[in-house]
Image (cartoon, grey):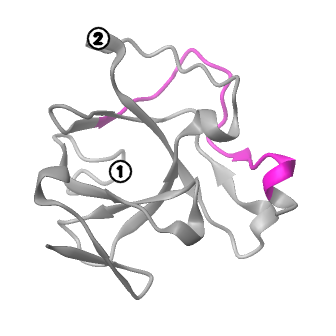
Amino acid sequence: MPTVKVQNTELSYEPSDVITFSEGLIGLSGLRRMVLVGQSSIEPFLWLASLDVQGMAFLVVEPRSLFPDYNARITEEGNDFLLLALVKLETEWANTTVNLRAPLIVNPTTKRGAQVVLSDSNYSLAERLPSQLLAA
């Protein structure tokens, strides 16, 4: 089983779990092959690790797990997609933010992903973590 190294930890994944972002991520067009890997110590967060650039990984979260009222209003055929938000880690946990304005959508069947910008929304690029998470 292949692995990716994230924060000095080898995390396993299935080859069938590779997600293709045909346009890459915003500002990182060369990152096209990624894999979602979990680590029990950071739940509900996941790592979105690049297979194109060794050692590059992003912390992501399903935004509704932290912001239950989050409604990205994304239309995807069948509405059967995984919605993720990028997390910007800060040295001081209380300053960590979540990008709700430009979520990632992943079709779990085709393993195709894209980052979309919600241009007509009031969601922030840097939404503070909910207070209950900061107390943890």
Is 124 in the magenta? yes
Question: CA gap, disc 1 to disc 2?
Answer: 29 Å
Q: Secondary structure at mark 1?
A: loop
Amino acid type, mark 1 = Gly
What residue is shown at x 52% (from left), y 67% (from top)? 40
Label 1: few (<14), some or many (≥20) within 10 Å? few
Q: Is residue 21 left or right of residue 123?
A: left
What residue is shown at x 78% (from left), y 54% (from top)? 133
Is 50 in the magenta? no
Q: Which residues are magenta?
A: 114-133
What residue is shown at x 27% (from left), y 64% (from top)? 50
- Quadrant occupied by the C terminus: bottom right
Which residue is denoted by mark 1 in the rendering? Answer: 27
Residue 38, given in percent of the width and then of the height, sits at: 42, 62
Which residue is denoted by mark 2 in the rendering? Answer: 78
Q: Earlier in the sequence, mark 1 or mark 2?
A: 1
Residue 26's quadrant in the figure? top left
Q: Secondary structure at mark 2?
A: helix
Q: Is residue 3 left or right of residue 119?
A: left
Residue 96's quadrant in the figure? bottom right
Label 2: few (<14), some or many (≥20) within 10 Å? few
Residue 112's quadrant in the figure? top left
- Quadrant occupied by the N terminus: bottom left
Q: Main secondary structure of the magenta part?
A: loop
Residue 67, given in percent of the width and then of the height, sits at: 70, 34
Residue 94, given in percent of the width and then of the height, sits at: 81, 63
Q: How many numbered badges does the structure rendering display?
A: 2
Q: Is residue 87 left or right of residue 106?
A: right
What residue is shown at x 88% (from left), y 61% (from top)? 135
Residue 58, given in percent of the width and then of the height, sits at: 44, 61
